[in-house]
Image (spheres, rainbow, N blue to C red):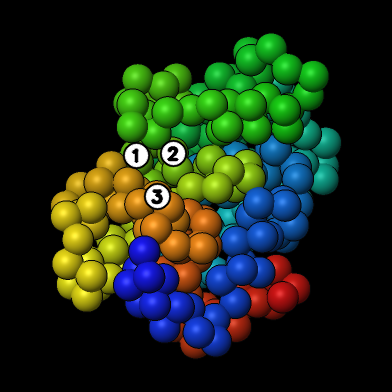
């Protein structure tokens, strides 16, 4: 454990990983605790666009066009939209993103919960990532391992998403520590590796995820992240 802690401490030195992670856990990012916007953000990320050049502008347009305008303020209202809705096509573009948005809204609208946020968070807290393809959200076409995990993170769950930043970080740390517990050869193993690092250190899993993102991000992305989350 001492070796793991030392290595992670070196990478974490001078980074705002704690603040970045806390913004997810406390729902204090720019989308706040609006479950419809949280789902929209996950759906907008499914085609691999850059976050600040593609995902965030898409969600901002969605908020203005649908949420602020009163067209889709709840999962029920969102689920009632048509895939070919002209405004939705204009805002989201790719059919994959629209499909994920509407199908996931239908799943959450049918969950027994006091409100939409509870529906989202109760799912996120109990979802089994290691069987994500058996989950009603994971079975939606267009929802891969990273989207599944990202939606859980957006809902406030302490976890990691198996994206290139996390994969690269696990491989880098694995080269230093030389532990069989670190393996990024597939998405499930990458997340399991982050969980192992959290167990073997003082870092939370989501802090490791955000540390990995920070180390891979460019200066412009880091600046934009701090500004959008008011850190």
Q: Which residue is mark 3?
A: 195
Q: Position of residue 44 (x, y in %)?
A: 51, 49
Give the SS element for disc 3. Answer: helix
Return the residue nearer the eye: 131 or 223: 131
Q: Which residue is mark 2?
A: 148
Left or right, 131 with respect to 206, comes to left
Return the residue nearer the eye: 112 or 73: 112
Q: Position of residue 96 (x, y in %)?
A: 40, 38
Q: Which residue is mark 1?
A: 144
Give the SS element for disc 2. Answer: helix
Gap in Å between the C-alphas at discs 2 and 1? 6 Å
Disc with the residue nearer the chain's start (3 vs 2): 2
Q: Quadrant of residue 72?
A: top right
Q: Are marks 3 and 2 in contact (CB under 8 Å)?
A: no
Q: Position of residue 37 (x, y in %)?
A: 68, 44
Left or right, 122 with respect to 217, comes to right
């Amino acid at each position: 454990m001492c070796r793991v802690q030392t290595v992670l401490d070196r990478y974490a030195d001078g980074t705002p990983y704690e603040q970045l992670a806390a913004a997810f856990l406390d729902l204090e990012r720019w989308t706040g605790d609006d479950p419809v916007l949280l789902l929209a953000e996950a759906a907008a990320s499914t085609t691999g666009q850059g976050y600040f050049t593609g995902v965030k502008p898409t969600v901002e347009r969605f908020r203005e066009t649908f949420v602020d305008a009163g067209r889709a303020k709840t999962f029920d209202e969102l689920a009632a939209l048509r895939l070919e809705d002209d405004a939705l096509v204009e805002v989201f573009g790719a059919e994959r993103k629209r499909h994920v948005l509407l199908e996931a809204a239908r799943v959450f609208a049918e969950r027994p919960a006091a409100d939409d946020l509870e529906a989202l968070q109760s799912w996120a807290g109990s979802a089994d990532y290691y069987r994500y393809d058996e989950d009603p959200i994971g079975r939606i076409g267009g929802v891969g391992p990273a989207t599944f995990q990202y939606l859980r993170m957006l809902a406030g769950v302490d976890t990691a998403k198996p994206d290139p930043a996390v994969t690269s970080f696990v491989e880098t740390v694995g080269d230093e520590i030389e532990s069989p517990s670190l393996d990024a050869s597939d998405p499930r193993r990458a997340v399991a590796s982050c969980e192992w690092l959290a167990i073997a250190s003082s870092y939370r899993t989501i802090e490791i995820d955000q540390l990995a993102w920070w180390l891979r991000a460019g200066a412009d992305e880091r600046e934009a992240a701090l500004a959008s989350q008011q850190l």
